[in-house]
Amino acid sequence: MVRKITPEQTPLKFEGPPAGERPLYLYLDKERRFIIVSDNILTLFRHPEVDTPLEISPEGISFLLQSGVIPTPRTIFKNLFVLNIGDFAEVKAGKKGLEIFFGHEFLYPASRRNPEVIPDEKRLLELLAQAVLTRLQPGAPVYLFQSLGKDSNTIALALAEAGFKEVTCLTLSTGDRKDESEIAAKIARKLGFPHRKLPVPEKISKRHKDEIIFYFENIPLPCVDGVSLAYPLYATQLDFRGTNIIDGSGNDIYMGHVPRKIEYQRQKIYPHFLFLRLFAEKLPTGNAFQKLARTRTEMVGALGFSYRDARRIYPLAEPVFPFWQAEDRKRRGWDYFDLKADVWGPNFEFDLVMRKVRNFAAVYKAHLIMPWTDAEVAAYVASFPEKYLYDRKNFKNKLFLRQILKKYLGIDSDALGKYSYGFNAYLFLQKMSPEAEEEILKCSLWNPKGVKKVLDRLSILARQGNRMARKLWVRLYLLSAWYNYNRYIKR
């Protein structure tokens, strides 16, 4: 879908997808003469009236450096906006051309759940299977990215119950204690699906490096999730062009994104220390006050370089604290479970978790299916009483999925424990040294002296095992490589 909007057609209102399946992108002409709207970013980029390559937004870079995410409706490019779950845009004709007024509403508060609903496991599995089967490109291979998580395995179960066997399960194989592939393979075989491991290479060859560059050349938007580096590696093992890819992301906003117990406790305390924020911003990244002086909305997942270091790296950097402070005010008095779902789902899950697989599908011309973002699936699950979704006392999530997987597959999620995605981007990039570091230092987006000074300090801390330093080292690489190679950037 692509549409051109002119002043004569206004006023108009656009809304993001109710469950996040196809975010809506809006390109505003520099002279404000028209707006191009599309739910496919590559289609929008190819439109003859979209002035590609596009100009970088200093605000977007500022958010990625300091928060690791660009909150909607902003994007990394000037004059390009995105509407996700709960977002809306009102377009009007003004004296100086078209004007866009953005807003947001939380669509899935706990107060809207129906206490009379009794979840039906067969109904949910049927809806998930339908969300896949009605979207498949016929005749093309079908792959499911399967982890040990509840989301992907519930999709696999739904397809098996529907009698659909034409799917191959794929799991990252890290060869260490976080390796999920052996157990995932057993689950796949139990369901009657073939399974294939996708191992992380022990040595980085020229082919791997060339594929990574190809990936950065062609991704529509940047993603600072380090796991995104695993996807071009997958492309060296399988040809994904023209295939169907099924991914289990997208249900946290309506299923409840349960915080860790320590996070829940801290969000009650940390806002009392916001008076220290201006002091923290003037100190090096990782200072004692930086984590402490955070808003509740930032505690959902926003953390990065201090403003001082962001400006050293990128002199055009803007402070992001005022934005997060304003977001806190909008949600004053909110229950943290609601706040986390509303801030995480449309922003962090969208710009990190889902962005990496969307980029992958775009680069390798695969057909992406995210059944949890189906509007009917979301509406059904969102109606469940809270007791079927999460346990506030014990901070357990997705209770109904746990029950289904234990009943049908014998998977005890409590006994299994939490498996995080095992790809270690920092250690992988160290295999590419010194090229990875050179990628950062040669990036013309940064201030050469400033970025070297910050990177040298990060490197020391990272070698000592500092997790935040490693994460930010990777973030700098991902941004630098994207800027160095991407075809959509106006330099």
Image: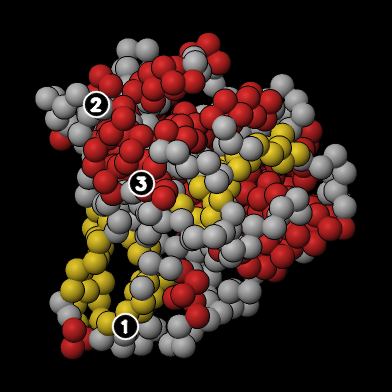
- Residue ID for mark 2: 119
Q: Residue furthest front?
A: 163
Write the residue at 41% across / 38% down: 162
Write the residue at 45% across / 63% down: 75
Question: Badge 3 local density, few (<14 within 10 Å), some, or many (20+)?
Answer: some
Q: Which mark is residue 258?
A: none
Look at label 2 and name its amino acid: Pro
Q: Secondary structure at mark 2?
A: loop
- The quarter holding residue 464 reads top right
For the residue pair 157 and 437, the one nearer the viewer reads as 157
Q: Secondary structure at mark 3?
A: helix
In this rendering, would 123 be left or right of 410? left
Q: Does 35 sit above or below residue 201?
A: below
Write the residue at 61% across / 33% down: 421
- Residue ID for mark 3: 130
- Residue 448 coordinates in the image, percent (x, y): 73, 62
Q: Which mark is residue 4?
A: 1
Mark 3 or mark 2, which is nearer the start of the sequence?
2
In this rendering, would 431 be left or right of 325? right
